[in-house]
Amino acid sequence: MSEQRLTVPPTGRILDMECRCCGGRSVELVIDLTDQPHCNRLVRPDAPAQAEPRFPLRVGFCRVCTMVQIDHTIPKESMFSDYPYVSGTTKTLPAHFSDTSHRIAAAYGLGPQDLVVDIGSNDGTWLKQYAPFGCRVLGVEAAGNVADLAKAAGVPTWQRFFNEACATDILSEHGAAKIVTAAGVFFHLEELHSVVAGIEKLLTEDGVFVVQAIYLGGMVENTAFDQVYHEHLCYYTLRSLSELLGRHGLEVFEATLVPIHGGTIEAHVARKGRRPVGASVRTMQADETRKGFGEIETYRNLAKSVLLLQQKLVGLLEQYRAAGKTVWAYGAPAKGATLLNSFGIGPELVQKAVERNPMKVGLAIPGVRIPIAEERADESPSAYLVLAWNFIDEFLKNPANIAYMAQGGEFIVPVPKVEVVGAAGPRAV
């Protein structure tokens, strides 16, 4: 594969789109990752070269409402009707969702008559955590393959896309929800305003919507550009999230940051005026203003940081190749496809990826065509490139990985900064 040459877009280029939040036409291009294939549409290794379609992957900043977003939409039916990601693959996510459900149950007094609806419920990992409280649960998941996993595990699940019409049907069959949740899905929403209108409709009068979404501020601070891919249409700060919710009579009354996925905003939302707005909201608003998360220059600077990251990572991988060392990818997440395709890293630098998810084994990462193999205990490379860097702490605690490093193996962590972790600890590049 030829090396991808990223550039910083010219200042002032307005994208041909309406803002997904406010509808304005003042969305300025700030990051251009060029044309890329759909990250989760894995391909057969022997498929014809360039068989997968490519689509623009451009990030814009709305000068009116500050929403950061991509301009090209791949139809949701193409991306989410069959999906290779399952929440229960790691130990980190079930533990995170267990903690979150206990906090929600304690804060809002969940009981047996209360309904919890999870939007984009995947394999039911989050809803399973409500079992101790005896409340009713319902997942809404568009991907048939993972919805089937949830139903097989005993989690009631509707296989469909959530929107205002879906909310109406849930009300008719199950009644209003005391809690509506959405984790790792709120930036996926093609029908954004219909979804938010549906949430408002579905909640009881004192109901709470709990949303967890990768935090744009964390992406900026961690240079986590690999969180940008076609499934992620919007990237939220508290300010832009509040702009969206306010258009549907909702407001954030509590806001915190949780460490999952490299930095996630957790917002608790109610009907406007229904609950007092807590100090956490004012604190985060002030922090975002101080750090310039509502200013376009912040995202122009992020584009420059991505170019520096490319230079360091590609240069390091070329050193490994020159020394005759092998490098495999540790995991094949969606974000990894963005990083590899943006930087032009193919099998000549990373020979293969190893995975625990059987839905990915035997296929290849689209675009770069790095083959995905099953992780095995009896073989290992000189170093692993950790594409799922947000789970690095879990990986480094794994006894097998500790033994691997003791024998000279290394983990290359690309984000938030390029560093190599071995038995002696991390070293910066």
Image: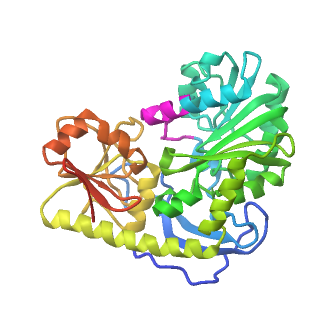
Is 25 placed above or below 37 here?
Answer: below
Q: Is residue 247 left or right of residue 234?
A: right
- Residue at image location 54% in from the left, 20% down from the top: 153
What colour scheme governs how the chains and residues are painted in the rendered image of this protein?
A: rainbow
In front here: 254 or 225? 254
Picture coordinates of residue 65, whole percent (x, y)? 75, 66
In front here: 74 or 279? 279
- Residue at image location 36% in from the left, 39% down from the top: 394
In what quadrant of the picture does the N terminus appear? bottom left
Picture coordinates of residue 155, whole percent (x, y)? 61, 22
Is 199 placed above or below 139 here?
Answer: below
In what quadrant of the picture does the C terminus appear? bottom left
* The magenta stretch spans residue 178: no
Q: Quadrant of residue 258?
A: top right
Q: Quadrant of residue 101?
A: top right
In front here: 6 or 104? 104
Asked if residue 203 shows in the view, the reply is no
* The magenta stretch spans residue 85: yes
Picture coordinates of residue 35, whole percent (x, y)? 50, 68
Is 36 placed above or below 136 here?
Answer: below
Asked if residue 399 shows in the view, the reply is yes
Numbered range of the magenta stretch: 82-98
